[in-house]
Image (cartoon, coloured by chain):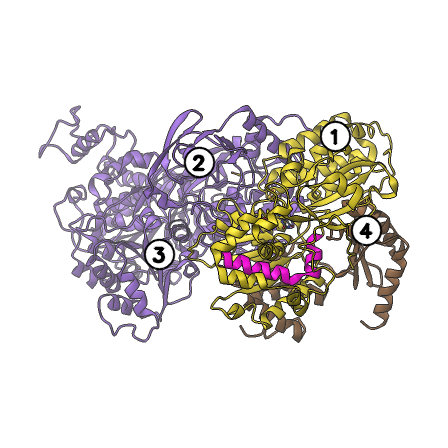
Amino acid sequence: MPRLVSHPDEVKIVTSRFGKGAAKIDTYLELGGYASARKALAEGAEWIINEMKASGLRGRGGAGFPTGMKWSFVPKQSAKPKYVLVNGDESEPGTCKDHLIFLHDPHAVIEGTIIAGLAIGAKMGFIYLRGEYRYLIQIVERAVAEAYERGFLGKSIFGSETEFEVIVQTGAGAYEVGEESALMESLEGKRGVPRIKPPFPAVVGLYGGPTVINNAETIATVPHALAMGGAAYAAVGSERNGGTRLFGLSGHIERPGVYELPMGYSLRKMIYEVGGGVRGGRKLKAVVPGGSSTPVLLPEEIDIGMDFDQVGKAGSMLGSGGVVVIDDQTCMVEFALRTIKFYQHESCGWCIPCREGTDWLKKSLTRFHAGFGTEKDIDNIQYIAENMMGRTFCPLGDAAAMPTLGFVKKFRKEFEEHLHGKPCPYAHHPEVELV
Amino acid sequence: MSAEAMTLFSPELAARLDALVERYPARRSALIPMLLYAQDEVGYLSDAVIDEVARRIGITPLDVRNVATYYSMLRFQPAGKFNVQVCTNISCMLRGGYKIFDRFQERLGIGHKGVTADGLFSLEEVECIGACCWAPAIQVNYDFHDELTEEQVDAILAQYRSQNAGGR
Amino acid sequence: MRTTPKSSLFEAGQPNVDEKSECMADVTFTVDGKKLTAPAGTLLIEACRKAGIEIPAFCYYPGLSLQAACRMCVVRQEKVPKLQTACTTPVAEGQVFITESAEIAQARKATLQLLLGNHPLDCPVCDAGGECELQDMTFKYGAGESLYVEAKQHREEQKWSPVVYFDRPRCILCYRCVRMCGEGMDVWALGIQNRGVTAVIAPNGGDHLDCEQCGMCIDVCPVGALTSGTYRYKSRPWEMNHVSTVCTHCADGCKVTLGVRSANDGMEIVRADNRDKSGINGDFLCAKGRFGFDFVESAERLTQPLVRNAAGVLEPTTWEKAIKHVGQRFGAILHEHGAGSIGVIGSTRTTNEENYLLQKFARTVLRTQHIDHERTGDYATFHGLLAGSKERAASHRDIAAAPAILLLGGNPTEEHPLLAWSLRTNVRLHQARLYVANSKAIRLERQAAHSLHFSEDGYDALVRRLSGDGAALADVTGAGAFCDALGAEESLVVVCGAEFRGASLAALMRWGLSRPGVKFALLSDSVNARGAADMGLYPDLLPGYLPLAGEQPLHDALAGMPTTSGKDATAMLEAAAGGGLQGLLVVGADPFAAHGVTEGALKNAFVVVQDCFLTRTAAEADVVLPTASLYEKTGTVTNCYGDVQMVRKAADKAGVKSDFEILVRMAGAMGVDVRTLVPFGEFQGVRADMGQTRGAQAGEADRHAVWLAANGLEPKLSPFDPFAILDEMERLVQGYALDRLNLFAGNESSTEPGTGFVSIDALLQRKDGVVATHPGLFDSGLLSERTGALQAIGKYQAAQAAQAAD
Ligand SMILES: Cc1cc2nc3c(=O)[nH]c(=O)nc-3n(C[C@H](O)[C@H](O)[C@H](O)COP(=O)(O)O)c2cc1C
Ligand code: SF4
Ligand code: FES
């Protein structure tokens, strides 16, 4: 069972009901649940969208797109039904926050889905969880059944004229399906290959109807933001980055776990105070600030506030909020290899630069790490990554290329130390094929 | 839609799949869950399973294969009764994921994608399973085991062996 | 909606080319500094191609859904941060693009480098070497140096069917084959399996293909991943001459490109494909067109004339002796028995020129009206009804572009593969409405907006219903809705099968002609079935369906012919058996087999057969003259939609002669001045004043010369030049005033029915004599039976079907 952690600096909004048995609807209601959905139903779509815009909530799935704005793009009139799609595919290495939300507060996701549906005029919502989260799917399905029993879902929600259905869907093992258009493909029973954009999902999405897709954390935040009032929620965070975020601290950290901290919270403090510093008192070598696809930061680069803009300015990305701490005993070549191995395994294979690029990078890095690298390899690795950047069909190619470029540029010396058949200066593990 | 006249599946699963196709705005949306549930019962996606799923959805077996082969949890060969999936992705790797994997290899005498001779266990190195903050983590079938040490490997294997002996 | 979600890959019917853009307003945009104009929403890659700016692409294929997968078509668009894919960018007013720059060249080069990293680079032994898009791109963008040192994936080539082979490492995953098979052919036999670098194109049978074996996947493959069983490892592309001609197997008349190279006994065909895609068949070619050419090399091929000797055995002889013998015997029969003593049965596989010449030879030299051919469509009635109605005959292109089509009877998927393709494509890309009415279930119903089933006698009832008889088809559900929907169509092409003939056909056409905007096409079964009919291989109709009596220039050209109708094929055979006919000339037909003539029945008649093979008729003939096949001669043929196309000599076989040359020499051997038959050389009456002599004092050939001059053509210098007859045909045969420039450029020129036909009442009283042969996807009778590849496919398909059955 995932361990819950806490720290005095935390601002518990989304996590406020964690550990309190809120997966049961009675407890959820006791803790103020479904009040926001009722209010949203009473106030109407325009109010919801305005409050969401005021909240400054930006998508927690990675790209940080303002949620209120995303919802406002959905056309009011549509010949085809509209849908809400909750992205619980959570597969970015370093990320396990949605895991906890589904486990401890599934009704918050359901309530958020209802609100999103009200905002855009959808009558159906899907909550898509990655297939590995089977026990969480059962928890969410039970919660959905409870909500139906209470009349919060169904033909007339909360006794109103409004209809809203929720379907819980399982994936079957594919990171790429987290990309929004691939997610829709998967939900339609197809290979998880992204779609050509435009049209964007807000216009042509699931089954051809306008669709809003949000990360599970984004959706779970919605009822809270409405309950607090958009402005109050915004005030918790930093400039243009409303509210809090669930940061997952993992890797060589003393107290790993998921912490809810205000947007803009210092990365240094996050590591050294919230997380208790590098494990075993070791020295910090690098930090991956937002899941495996975000370029590494060096110890001298961690004096930044953790919000989308500041991390972006530092040359990386806030991404999914998965902060991976790396100590000085770690081989960065091996780390780079393990990272690229993941993307090679998960590339959908649709486009040439990603399919071939990730494979080539993986092969080169494998050989390189095994001590058979050449000087030219380092440049080649950089060349391949540079030529993938911005050229692929979907952002997975970038997600593979960006961190690779970061590793090569920031740790070139360490790459050079692997040259000329020298053994890896760090203890390393022989490579195992993932097929 | 009436229940399949001839089915490979248990009556419970067949009934569940009958309901599943009716759940979505488009029948085909049931495909991936259907494959996964069928695999849970049969153990893997045999040709016969693929044919039946194709029939239930109303698409060709080729089309089912196109989709099924895309998803890494779906398999076309039997796995062990207990499929041990060890995450070695970055967060787990940093906290000893490979050591855990090695210990399983050694204890079970099989490698990546191997199945023990008695068919009880299979082993897989897998990508991130969403337990990074509780690393290193593994899944045995759908059960998570996290914050593992190498020492716990034996206990975990023992737990599943006894579960097997218990007739489940 | 311009951009189709790529997911349509596994769903039929999603167009990517929105032809409606044609009605959209033009926009102006800039490409590489040039101002271009195109309808708003045109894909940039198409707009550029039309303007002569080539943007490289692997995955983009016109008419198939969009992929944006290969990333070769990247271009820079002003004010857009990332490079954009031209294949998915719709043009809009004021946009500015750069399609070639250092940055773009680098992007393309890198993509190629990535592809080549895992590519086997076995160009020297690859079928596609020399005509490979990957090779060409690499040449252009120069991904010369190898950055890749890892071992390449090697996998054995796989045989997916007798004619489709797959070499996986060469595949660049452009998905063209998958889309062509699914979207284009509606067969869906290819898929994509696995993901990432392990992704692979997979056939529906696991390790083999269960499909129509059309080979379209091979055709669209930009590299050598899919190769043809009939061509692989046979030749290098540059060793071949590529001759564009017309497929010999069915009445659709697809343009086919034959790859030929020299062989011991002439020129051999090593490949048939659809290189230039400029024909009426566009991208399409079926299994027969693509794989059915080796009958040309069949061991059963006749290569020496045979004459029955005193012992009653067919014995090889020289051409001179054989022709002389025929000339003498025919001359003697005519001398002894006079006009009408010889019958002629012509071919539906020979050229128009040969057929025209044959009837002229029959009528003027053999002085007979006993002329016929194997009729597979009632074109006499068809033309009789169309007389005087302009624009009512539908060409193939009319069908391919019609907003609504009514398909009555027939089974195009099996019998008219091109028609099936064009109907599917029209529905898919232009949202055409297809109405199918049939007594059987046919595949094309999948594309139909409305379909109707009834018993075999329902066709006439349907026509009655359409013509206002509410009681007709009353017991057929959906008949009312079907007819109402049809009634609402303002413009309609009616395509009907051999179910319609005589009175049925007349009733149908009368209904259609009573409404504006209805056009007709009548299906038939062999490559020149329509041409044989048009060229007057009838006992009662002259070329162009003119009556025997008349004063048209054609009647002058046929001066001396008998003026009463002759016998049809059945009657001829009966007469010959009964001693009523002394001679029979059979050209490219097998009436003994078709009419079940018993062995030896015609032993008292002198029978001459011209054919490629020893057919049943030939085996019983007195003289057998080995002929060139359609792939070994020049001329024109007319498909069942009335489109005339050029046939060009591709192969060459020692020992055989064209039917044209045989007929001319036969006439010569009978002592005829061949100039009266073939207007060539310095004609009588030309007297060096070509174009000036007019009126009564000018002879026939002179008038011909006037016409030639007026049309900018020159006199033909050889009696064996089929174009001399083409000139005459064009002048004398109604509907054959062809667009010569187009025709000689390799395009089709469609005929238009004329006037002055035999009265429809007279036509309806005669026997139509139509016997449909129902060819199959791999079956065209005589030729397919002697084509190794088609026989192999046939066996393979039968085995597949047997397996599916148990
Ligand atoms: C390769 C790839 C994988 C992704 N995986 C996830 C994921 O697992 N979960 C998620 O919420 N978003 C994921 N995203 C982002 C989604 O595409 C999408 O932006 C997000 O779900 C939108 O929700 P938000 O606006 O609430 O962030 C992924 C994107 C890419 C390109
Ligand atoms: S970048 Fe290309 S191959 Fe990679 S996941 Fe996206 S579409 Fe698939
Ligand atoms: S042609 Fe545009 S990406 Fe392939």
Q: Which residue is mark 2?
A: C44
Q: Which residue is mark 1?
A: A410
Q: Nearer the viewer, residue C679 or B65?
A: B65
Judging from the image, mark 1 belongs to the subunit labelled A
Q: Amino acid at mark 3?
A: Arg
Tag nearer the camera, 3 or 4: 4
Residues drawn in magenta: A97-121
Report if the beta carbon of the residue with label 2 is closer than 8 angstroms to ligand 3: no
Q: Quadrant of ligand 2?
A: top right
- Are discs 2 and 4 less than 8 Å apart at CB? no
Task: Give the CA distance from mark 3 to mark 4.
Answer: 61 Å
Q: Amino acid at mark 4?
A: Pro
Chain A on-screen colour: yellow
Judging from the image, mark 3 belongs to the subunit labelled C
Provide the letter of the chain coloured purple: C
User: Which quadrant would the C terminus of chain C be assigned to in this image?
Assistant: bottom right
Within-10-Å neighbours for mark 4: few <14, some 14–19, many 20+: many
Say which element carries label 4: loop
Task: Give the CA distance from mark 2 to mark 1.
Answer: 40 Å
Q: Amino acid at mark 2?
A: Leu
Q: Is residue A105 magenta?
A: yes
Chain B on-screen colour: brown
Q: Position of residue C748 (x, y in %)?
A: 33, 41
Judging from the image, mark 2 belongs to the subunit labelled C
| In the image, residue C459 above or below residue A348 | below
Q: Which residue is mark 4?
A: B136
Task: Give the CA distance from mark 4 to mark 1.
Answer: 27 Å
Q: Is residue B73 left or right of residue C165?
A: right
Residue at image point 60% right, 36% down: C126
The prevailing secondary structure element of the residues shown in magenta is helix
